[in-house]
Amino acid sequence: VLFRTVAMMVPDYTMIGEISLYSMGFSNAKSLAEKIIDIYKLCSEQLSSQSHYDYGMRAVKSVLTSVENLKLMYPDKNGEEIVLRAIYDVNMPKFSSEDIPLFIGIYGDLFPGVDLLVPEREELINKININLNKRNLQSTPWFIDKIIQIYEMVLVRHGLMIVGEPFSGKTCAYQVLAESLGDLQLDRKAIMKEFKTKCKIINPKAITLGQLYGSFDVVSHEWHDGVLAIVFREFANSASKDRKWIVFDGPVDAVWIENMNTVLDDNKKLCLMSGEIIQMNSKMNMIFEPANLEQASPATVSRCGMIYVEPKQLGWRSFWLSYKQTLSPKILLDHQTMMDDLIEWLVPAIFDFIQTHCSLFLATSENHMFNSFTRLIECMIKEGTGVGFGTITLGCIIIFCLIWSLGSLIKGDCRNKFDTFLRKLLLGNIDQYKKPSTFRLTKINLFPDMGTVYDYVYDKKNNGSWILWSELLESKMISPDARINDLIIETDETAKQNFFLRIYLKNEIPLLFVGPTGTGKSAIVLNYLIHLPKEYFLANVLNFSARTAANTVQDIIISKLEKRKRGVYGPSTGKKCMLFVDDLSMPLPEKYGAQPPIELLRQWIDHGNWYDLQTKSRIDILDMLFIGVLQPAGGGSNQVTTRFTRHMNAIGIDSFSEETMSKIFSQIMIWHLNKGFSESISHQSIVLTKRFIRQSCIF
């Protein structure tokens, strides 16, 4: 009764395409329009269903826009070649590697015998290669294609999304493109005319909706602009010819991005709640950089051009090639050859085993694990600078680093399986993975038979040998006046944590400890921070809870730092701030899965800045290092986004063995019974401890 029905008619895509193509000067517009629509129909039927795929009217409109641009560039080319190239440019970037062969087959059937037109991008590709070399990145054909695809999409769509999991090259791709376009502008000999690019990066989930767009003051009802409103107005009013990109580096959901619909469609207007409407200019682009689009609405997906990047296409070998270039001056040529052989032999074998036989404390990827390996081995090589490395020593260091990077997150029982597998692999007893001739380590040079590979650390002293972690411990007497809550009993686990705390923080690498509750993760980190020299280090400790808010976290961290100059914060000059976040996985996810406190920390680690909560101006954070502790997901602990954990070298801390528990409680019992108890009672401490542990295991 209250609502009147309205009939909506699906537009005739073919007729729209035909009229547009005729207006561009194509004589065979009808057949070309039919082919464009047929391709989208076949793609929707035959390709996989992905959240970032769209075959609607806006996709057709993008193809027509691309056709128009190509027609102006190549007026003498065949119409079919131009249309095929436009279809390729608009659609190829968004397809997954499994769907690409199917798509090639579809357009091959509809355009038989038509060669794919290759636009002249040699000048841009040359600049891209130069900038990749400057950043020590690998110019693989796949990565260069993705950078070119972003450029082609920028020309066609004013809103685009670069979608992909961590370590797929999203950020580097658009940054290298921006640098290359700037270099083209400076190159007077270049035929291709381009402009310098300005980027402003915002994480939309690190701030509230009011801080993003703007809000009215509750008391005075005065309007205050948000971060996006200020940046958008600045770019829109700019008269310069530079390209201007606003990059949203964070999760996309159906709430905050709905206000962007008028910006992303043909209106190109940002409508604020104050009533102000800001018109986007022709030099602006809105770039979104999410890991996935599971929470995005179809209305948002259809409004944006898509570039999909996959970590497996980049592969861990790209990281190895980049690291080798920094490693070359530090080690001998023979050692480089041996390292190459060892990596090609051990890494694929370990990855295959972990994927099929192991469960992990934390969701991660092969690229992340291998990146952790390159960081750890770099730290170990720096530790040995000036000492020199023999072949045996270097081989043992590589094995140690592989265990504590690729295998560091393996859970309890799976560690025993991994131990058995790795010992067999190193002795050459697995036929599937042939031992290289350059690997000269024998059983004498490898781990002792007792315990697992996780129980040993390679000691370069005394001609190099594998020693138990406990041998790194210094014997300390517990003070009789110590409080029981402050006691830390030195065990293998404390030796491991202290070793990695020292080596990673010395090299300014973010560190994450993962493991079940009751394993002393937080206590050992706090003890380490307490004993750091106060004149060089400032400790800042945060405990997250389910109700922790991003604004609160930012206020607490900033309150411990000094304002060095306008827009720059950090500890006192000459100091480092050690930011320790306990219970990192506790913040409750929002309706669409984002955790604002985690996104806030990610923005700092990724880009080194936040936005002032009052003035909305950018503030840079300097000289701050990160240490985190979290429990695996389950119970009150939540899954933390891999876009945050990818920055950390993660160390798994497993539940204590019975031997470790016995050592801890027997020392506490001895310490307590030595305070005035008779000898007959003191001698019973070990027996009492064993009975206590046995009873606790039963319960």
Image: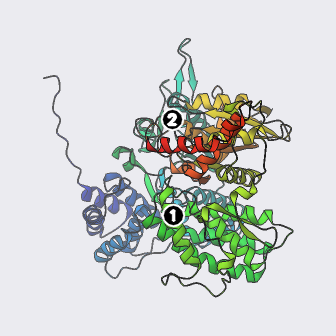
Q: Nearer the viewer, mark 1 or mark 2?
A: 1
- Location of residue 68 in the rendering, given as x and y in whole percent from the top left corner: 42, 61
Relative to 214, is 476 on the left or the right?
A: right
Quadrant for residue 91, please give it.
bottom left
- Tell me which numbered mark, 1 or 2, is placed earlier along the sequence: 1
- Location of residue 269 in the rendering, given as x and y in whole percent from the top left corner: 47, 37
User: Where is 616 relative to 199, above or below?
Assistant: above
What is the three-letter code of the residue carrying label 1?
A: Asn
Furthest toward the front, the residue is 680
The image's mark for residue 1 is: none
User: Where is 430 relative to 216, above or below?
Assistant: below
Helix, strand or loop status at disc 1: helix
**Around disc 2, counting alpha carbons within 10 Å, would you say few (fewer than 14), some (14 to 19), or many (20 or more)?**
many
The image's mark for residue 416 is: 1
Along the viewing direction, whichever of 252 and 511 lies nearer the viewer: 511
Relative to 581, is 350 on the left or the right?
A: left
Q: Residue at x 66, y 74 (%)?
A: 446
User: Where is 103 relative to 513, above or below?
Assistant: below
The image's mark for residue 587 is: 2
